[in-house]
């Protein structure tokens, strides 16, 4: 999966969590990501073909179980990295969000696990 696909899945999950609605509109995705609706429609079509989302013609988008797994993994990485950068290292939250978005796709599982362990250890010391 490409980084952009992961970003779309993560965005869908964020919208679901914020609205408590399992179905998301193309317009909502477009607004949150700051991209054209036509770009979102194209990306959703690709994600649908790959089995990550469900969408009937001109209807809302929902994550499949396969899409939910990827979205949760990326979103959890994003939140963990943002928290580490901002809360532990003291990086400005906006910059921390930006950097987390860049790193969340490429960081290895092993490094991420070690980071989560480190953060837990630091929190226990407080």
Image (tube, grey):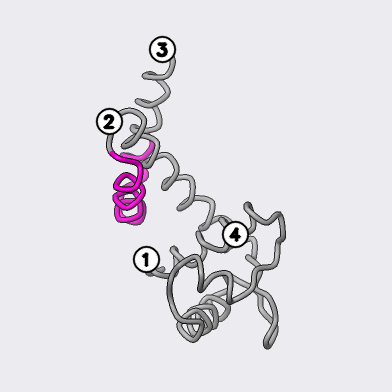
Query: Where, quadrant-wise, is the C terminus in this rendering?
Result: top left
Q: CA distance from mark 2 to mark 3?
A: 15 Å
Q: CA distance from mark 4 to mark 2?
A: 28 Å
Q: CA distance from mark 1 to mark 2?
A: 26 Å
Whole-percent x and y of residue 43? 48, 79
Q: Residue furthest top?
A: 125
How many C-alpha atoms fall within 10 Å of the one at disc 1: few (<14), some, or many (≥20)?
some
Q: Residue at x 51, y 82 (%)?
A: 37
Q: CA distance from mark 4 to mark 1?
A: 18 Å
Magenta stretch encompasses residue 95: yes
Q: Earlier in the sequence, mark 4 or mark 1?
A: 1
Q: Is residue 12 left or right of residue 35?
A: right
Secondary structure type for disc 4: helix
How many C-alpha atoms fall within 10 Å of the one at disc 2: few (<14), some, or many (≥20)?
few
Q: Which residue is mark 1?
A: 3
Whole-percent x and y of residue 84? 35, 34
């Amino acid at each position: 999966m490409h980084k952009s696909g992961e970003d779309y899945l993560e965005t869908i999950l964020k919208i679901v969590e914020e609205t408590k609605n399992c179905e998301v509109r193309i317009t909502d995705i477009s607004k949150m990501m700051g991209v054209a609706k036509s770009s979102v429609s194209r990306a959703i079509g690709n994600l649908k073909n790959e089995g990550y989302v469900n969408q009937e013609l001109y209807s809302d988008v929902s994550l499949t179980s396969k899409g939910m797994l990827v979205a949760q993994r990326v979103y959890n990485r994003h939140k963990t990295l943002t928290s580490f950068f901002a809360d532990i290292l003291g990086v400005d939250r906006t910059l921390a969000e930006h950097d987390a978005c860049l790193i969340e796709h490429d960081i290895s599982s092993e490094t991420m696990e070690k980071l989560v362990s480190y953060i837990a250890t630091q929190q226990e010391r407080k």
